[in-house]
Structures are given as C-alpha cells and as structure tokens.
Amino acid sequence: MLSISFQQIKESYKRIRSYIHHTPVMSSSQLDSETGCSLFFKCENLQRTGAFKIRGAMNAVLQLNDKERKCGVTTHSSGNHAAALAFAAKTFDIPAYMVMPDNAPIVKQQAVKGYGAEIIPCKPTMDDRERMLNHVVCETSAAVIPSYNDHRIISGQGTAALEFLEEYPDLDMLLAPVGGGGLISGTAIVGKSVNPNLRVIGVEPLLADDAKRSLKAGKIIPSTYPNTIADGLRTSLGDITFPIIQNYVDEITTVTEQEIIDAMFLIWERMKIIIEPSSAVPVAALLFHDIKQAGKNVGVILSGGNVDLKSLPWMKA
C-alpha cells in the first residue's frame, strides 16, 4: 500500500497552485529525430526559484501551525530545496535557517540569501549536515522541513507529474532524475495512478548510483562522497522514498559525467533553455542509452535551471 496516495497529491496541488507556476511543456523536432521518439519536456527549470523544489517546500510551509511559523523553518540542502524553502518562508514572513555544504554552488547560496534566509555553512558530508541541522534546531526550535524524505514534500513534488499528465495523458514513458527520491516517488505515484501501463524510469549519475545499488540489494545503501557535477542528486534515498521506488518505479538507469555534460549542452544549444546538470541526467539516458522505444511518447521532467554561468561544465571538459 502506498504511504502517499494519489488523492493526497491532488489535494496538495489545490493547496499550492496559486503560489507556483504552471510550467510549460516544450518539444524539439531535432531531438525527436535523434531519439526516434516524440519527446515532451516538463520545464520545471522555469518554475519559481528555478526548480521543482518550490512545490514540496510550499506544500510543507502551508501546513505549519502557528507555533512552527513563529519559530521558523530549517533544513540542510545543497541549494534548490534551500532556495525553495527560503522563498516559501519569506512569502509568509517566517524565519528560515539553511544548513548548506560549503561546496554548494555559489549561485544557489546567493539565491538563498536573496530570499532572506540565514545560511549556516557545514562540511559536505551527510554526518556534518545532520549534525549542524541538529544544532540549529536546538538553538532556534525551528521546524525541520526535509528536502525529500517527507510526506508533504513528496506530495508536493508529485504535482509536477500531475500537471504533466493532465496535459499529455498519452505518454508511454516518463523519466525523472533521482537524488533523495522525492521527485521520482511523487512522479511514480501519479504516473501509475493515471496509467498503470506508463513506464516510469529514474535516472542518476553513475558516480552517485546509490538508488540503483539499493534496489539491487533490497535495502538502502547510502551514497558516500559522490563526486558528480549533478549536485542536486548527491543525497541518499530515505525510508519513505525507497519503498515507493521499489514498488512503483520500473527501472533505475545511470549515466556518466560526460554524458550529463553533453546532454546539458545539447538542450542549451537546441532548445535555447537553461537547465542544470541534474536536469540533464534523464536527457542523457534518452540520448546515449538504449531505454527508449521508437515511435513512443516520452515525457521528461527537467527538474531545474540554477547554474553558475561563470563556471559551466563544458568549460572544464
């Protein structure tokens, strides 16, 4: 039985829809030709705060009680969730304290500061992130809003697929990136509820392939020091997201760092839109791996577009 229902995701959408963008779906005849499929891209890179994360963050903040609002909110995040939570908190004049690893992209740190949140730096390990988060909670009594392993967050993230499938109900396959599993979990719940035959595929970097390894082992295998340019996908699965992925995601596949860079470059060049490395991960799977079926309708969630324009990955390649 699902720990989060399709109905909960629909209720979440009603709750947040006036605070988020209904993002467009784009296509590219050139990419269709290259893959042999009809591709449809859900552009969460054009979402408020530049990523899908605002969906879950807003859903969580809207459900806080008065005491929690007064004390504020906190989380640990490499960037997009921190920015989304900071924005959601600012919307309702709620204090926000963001624990961020010191290697988080500067553009994402600047966004968090711009939304009025306080940044508490930490070393880029999960132990250090959680240790600093506990310190913040002790000092402020702020409510912890996890970046993915939370019913409110997963329900909010699932609204991207809800919008997508309301507009394009005839998709044969739906791809999303996998980090902690919030987006792919919500996507799988919606996808399988709308169409049990829809093939839901999660994609992660080969250098952060904990989801694939966890599914193979039948238990969560944490990601340790993942050195991938897809900074939004460095986190490990949680005890809520893992069983959803086990039961409702058809396949987890991986892509290399160079494939991520090449896919990101291609989207910038062909579609004239900015996506970050995490968004390019499922695109890379379609371009360079044999997971597609000719003539099928394939949906891809482009998860975000927050990049440092002074340090693009192909400049280092």
Image: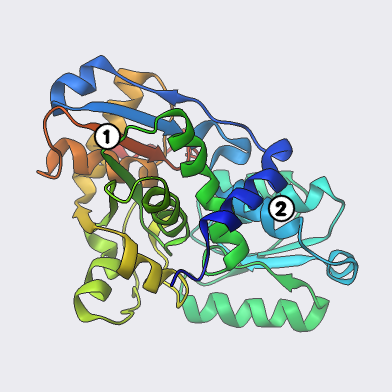
Q: Position of residue 236 (x, y in %)?
A: 40, 71
Q: Nearer the viewer, residue 104 or 42?
A: 42
Quarter that holds the N terminus: bottom left
Snapshot quadrant of residue 279 = top left
Looking at the image, residue 13 sits to the left or right of residue 291; the answer is right
Q: CA distance from mark 2 to mark 1?
A: 33 Å
Quarter that holds the C terminus: top left
Say what secondary structure mark 1 lies in.
Answer: strand
Q: Is residue 236 visible?
A: no
Sort mark 2 into few (<14), some (14-19) or many (20+) by Cα contacts within 10 Å: many
Looking at the image, residue 235 sits to the left or right of residue 175; the answer is right
Q: How many marks?
A: 2
Q: Amino acid at mark 2?
A: Ala
Tell me if residue 156 comes above or below residue 248 in the rendering: above
Tell me if residue 195 comes above or below residue 212 in the rendering: above
Residue found at x 23% / y 49% = 257
Snapshot quadrant of residue 189 = bottom left
Residue found at x 38% / y 72% = 242
Q: Position of residue 205 (x, y in %)?
A: 27, 56
Q: Position of residue 74 (x, y in %)?
A: 70, 67
Residue found at x 58% / y 66% = 151
Say what secondary structure mark 2 lies in.
Answer: helix
Residue found at x 47% / y 40% = 304
Q: Position of residue 229 (x, y in %)?
A: 34, 51
Q: Nearer the viewer, residue 252 or 75?
A: 252
Q: Nearer the viewer, residue 175 or 118?
A: 175
Q: Which mark is residue 298?
A: 1
Q: Amino acid at mark 1?
A: Val
Looking at the image, residue 124 sits to the left or right of residue 314; the answer is right
- Of pointers 2 and 1, the one earlier in the residue sequence: 2
Q: Which residue is mark 2?
A: 86
